[in-house]
Image: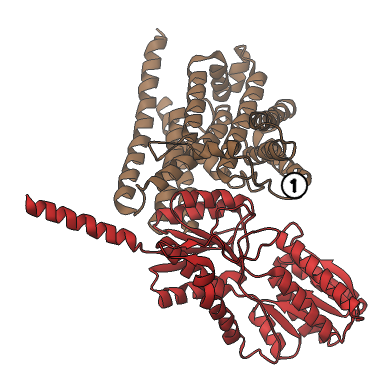
Chain colours: A red, B brown
Amino acid sequence: MNNFIKSAVLAVTASAATMAAAETRVALVPGGPHPFFANWEGGGVDAVKDFGVASSDYRVPQEWKLDMQNKMLESLVSQGYNAFAVFPGDANGTNAMVSELKDFGAPTVSIAGCTQSPSPVEFCLATDVYKSAYQGTMALIEAMGNEGKIVHETSLLIDPNTQLRVAAVEQAIADAQAEGKKVELYQHLTDVDDQEKADQKINALLAGKAHEFDGLVSTAWVASVVTSKALRSSNNEDLKFIAIDHDQIVLDAIKDGVIQGTMLQNPHGQAYIATYALDKLLNGCTIKADAPFSPTPQHTTFIDSGTMLVTKDNIDNWEAEMKAVTDGIMATFDEKFLDCAS
Amino acid sequence: MPPRPDAVNLNELLARIAKSAGLALIVGVLILIFVYGAQGFTSKFNLFNLTRNLSVAAVVGFGMMVVLALGHMNLALGSTALASVMIMGWVMKVAALPVPVAVGCGLAVGSLLGLLNGWLIVKTKLHSFIITLATASMFLGLVLIMFPGGPISDLPREFTGISKTRYFGWVSGMLLITLVAGVVLAVMYRFTTLGRQMLATGANPDAAELSGIPVSRAILLAHTLSGFLAALAGVMFTARQGSALLSTGEDWLLASFLAPLLGGTLLAGGYVSVVGAFLGAMLVGILQNGLVLIGVPDFWVEFVLGLTLLITVSLDRLRNVLAARRGN
């Protein structure tokens, strides 16, 4: 009888110990297929290596549809994933799914894009799109010699990030004008983050009206690639261009002097930091009530994942510089955002 | 001497039970395979989602079944659902009217669009395939014109809560809606004149007309019912997503045929099985869920579903050919 009691106590203790150190299986789920998210995979792999997390896997829904993403999240829970980093398929709509994940005990963070607050996500780790667009426009103005007309290439107007980017570009131009620089906005070219539309709109603009403006700033991945290709094939050295993100075509164009620079985001760092934080949250930590988030109009618990300008001067060193940005966030992450006392 | 009606009914009943029992057996075997082979299949979270998705899929199947009873089809099922939920979302969120009013509006829109399909089929005498192919495109286009701003998000919790109700911790409350719809349909086909008129119209429209059955009315009502069920499935789907999405109903076509055809409903009309359609939806839902859990990529799941439909329709055709030979 005594042996039975001892065994039972041991079994209970062992199971309690297992529960205390829950095995963290993170799923990194974008809204759909897009090259921007490919670097999440490496971020997850590095976090597994560095922090001993059981797994952090990159899983992509077949299409950009909220119901596809929701279905995938449901099946991932059934497959044993217990923490999620998602790019919201819909800023409002994703909240319903996250709330179900939370009820199930799976913490969720939104990365690369934010849900609309109030939201059940623990926090949103994404690029400060306003800052990135503002800095990119300022870099273009400098490359243009502080004068000329600017085209802004961006995504769909209904995307809340696009609204912020439009506002940032306009503010940068207004600030430059206030400093006496002779710059003005020529056009916001919207809905060019889709290959077919970007090809049509950008090539038509460059073929027909390139003589009417002096520079372009892009805040959309596909537009950056299409414009870099078009400028290389047209040999138009008069037009200056600041792209966004790190597609190899864009980076090669910077190296070869075809374009002037690109505003990098930090997808690798987003997945890396999210995996770390989710593991902590699953193992007893909570988000500090007084954490120093940087609220945006869309989201109250926002953390900037970092952005930087890459030009010909630092093109060979950008990965190390971006890693330094990630390390900078990680260095103070626990202290700023986590409460692991209990 | 002609056979006694009740003797025919008994034979028919036995044949129906045999068909449904066969399908139930396959569903049972599949469940056993996934219980032992797919990790996480029996988790409460998975079973809840399985029953929730099943409840929508079965209503989608019912929506197609009621027109298959006539020997018709409704290719506008998905876009009818889309139009219904977008109007419902607008009434709920923009007009800020109470949830029951908004849901009522959505169901009314679905019924009206179904009625329009039926009316066009009756008046033009064109095949339902052509009419509903055209109206599917029209409804979709109209919705895109009316709602250029995309989805209607952040619907009230009073509405989305429907999809969160659960019994025993794992049975979705939405299954109750599906069961009520199924029972009403079964009673209609089994015990009401209207249901029998629909089946008679499907079995042989000319004979039905000659024997005094109001064929046009049966067509109008069956398509109205199909529109209503499409809207009902849309409402349930929207409650689950928390938003009225422009992708509602986009990929329902295959599933809408699969559930009733697997369940024994005849493509040529004249016979339906409500229980069979429900079991067919179960088979598809369990197959999809289990295959994903054992790590089969989504693209293969689509392939398997398409293949299942092809085999089902081929078997149905074979059955008809053999029956015809026996008759000769």
Residue under circle 1?
B144
Residue A81's x, y, as percent?
A: 42, 59
Please tell me which residue lies in front, A255 or B197.
A255
Residue A117's x, y, as percent?
A: 63, 54
Q: Viewed as shown, does residue A310 lie left or right of A29?
A: right
Mark 1 belongs to which amino acid?
Leu
Residue A218's x, y, as percent?
A: 76, 74
Q: Residue at x 68, y 45 (%)?
A: B152
Residue B243's x, y, as percent?
A: 63, 45
Q: Viewed as shown, does residue B273 lie left or right of B254?
A: left
Please tell me which residue lies in front, B34 or A282.
A282
Q: Name the element at disc 1.
A: helix
Vertical comparison of B201 with A25: above or below: above
Q: Quadrant of residue A156?
A: bottom right
Report if residue B320 is visible in the image: no
Vertical comparison of B208 with A337: above or below: above
Q: Residue at x 75, y 68 (%)?
A: A198
Crowding around mark 1 (Cα neighbors within 10 Å: few <14, some 14 to 19, many 20+) is: some
Q: The C terminus of chain A lies in which quarter of the figure? A: bottom left
Q: Quadrant of residue B323?
A: top left
Chain to which mark 1 belongs? B
Vertical comparison of A324 with B98: above or below: below
Vertical comparison of B187 with B324: above or below: above
Q: Residue at x 83, y 67 (%)?
A: A188
Please tell me which residue lies in front, A320 or B310.
A320
